[in-house]
Amino acid sequence: MEKIKLILFLALLCSCNTSEKKITKVERISLDAEIITDSIHASLPGSLIVFNDYVVWEEAFASDKFLHVVDIQTRKEVGRMGEVGQGPKEFIHPQISRSYDDCILAFVQGTKHQAYFSIERFLAGEDYYIPVPNSIKINPKSNFCLLEIERGQFITLQPNSDKLLEHWTRPYFYSFGKFPIPESLRKRDRFSYFQGNVAYNPDLKKLIYTSYRFPYMAIYTKSGKSFKLQTEVKGKFDYSVSSGGEFKRSRDSKEGPRELTLTLDYIVTVDRDLSIDQTDENEVGRDPMKLPHTVFIYDYEGNLLKIVNLGFPVVRIAADTKNNTLYAIVVMDDYVLVKYEL
């Protein structure tokens, strides 16, 4: 017999210390896109990363080089990097994240194949491939959603563990982090439902986690080598968990944010504004035209400030924590790289 719980979270504005929160009316605005390039020729654009005057976008199913480097000022692609293949400097099904300085961290989940790609060296015409030193390399069993927050310090997402996140400083690591729901799930459901995005603001020392499947965000503050949960932001979500840990969600329950990025002042997520968009999430599939048109803008305390309509279905977003410019890949007639000033 299933044990059914109905969890009614305080929509959008709820935290570990809710008595200190003030519920305010959320501003809804629309912004006009400034086109950077419409030369995004890919069946599916992957990750998007910003480095000062350059934007790097990943071609998920590339046959040769999988990273495209675009000059924001000239609005031209200046080259491609990241070899696809099985050689020592090549990658099959790579994942990427922004690393320290001007580097991209490229890795293959479940393997020891991890390397930095230096944007500065690439632009200078030099060898941009830098192997991750063995002294700081992460165990392949732990490199799911790998994020380097400082030189040699990594955050990994661990949906199958007792704690959601791990902080690695080789040879040591410690586990921390709450799951979006309190119930214990069977292993395959944990992996499916607790995956999400992780981002870090090194100036504010804030680590953000958002769940793909739950309307849930957690904000952690780094102190020394540990992280403390600062705020949880939860939305309404109906589900049930059986005695054997099988998870079932209500068909009409809201999904979590699809994308996450951080600017100077804001946490930005790609999320659906149900007040104007009633698209059934179960029917979105791989149809990019059914993606949300809106991004939700939060401050670093977890307060929802604005819901911004970008005017087009949003595939990817990226930003730099030095300013409040948002870059996005949106769907017009084709995929287009655009920017907005928040």
Image (cartoon, rainbow, N blue to C red):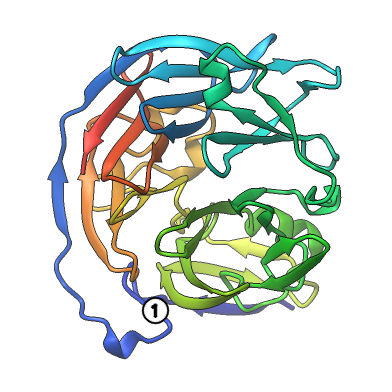
Coordinates of residue 218 in the picture (x, y in percent):
48, 68
Q: Residue at x 57, y 61 (%)?
A: 249
Which residue is identified by label 1? 15
Image spot of residue 129 (x, y percent): 70, 24
How many numbered dots are placed on residues in this image? 1
Question: Is residue 156 in view from this perspective?
Answer: yes
Q: Residue at x 42, y 77 (%)?
A: 8
Picture quarter with the C terminus: top left
Q: Which picture quadrant has residue 329?
A: top left
Expressed as whole percent of the image width and height from the top left, the position of residue 69 reads 48, 18
Between 148 and 45, the residue placed more toward the observer is 148
Q: Quadrant of residue 83?
A: top right
In-front residue for pair 55/18: 55
- Left or right: 68 as drawn, with respect to 110: left
Foreground residue, 277 or 172? 172
Residue 41 in view, yes or no: no
Q: Considering the image in quadrants, where does the N terminus appear? A: bottom right
Residue 194, compared with residue 322, is above or below; it is: below
Q: Position of residue 103 (x, y in %)?
A: 57, 35
Specify whether 216 is left or right of 22: right
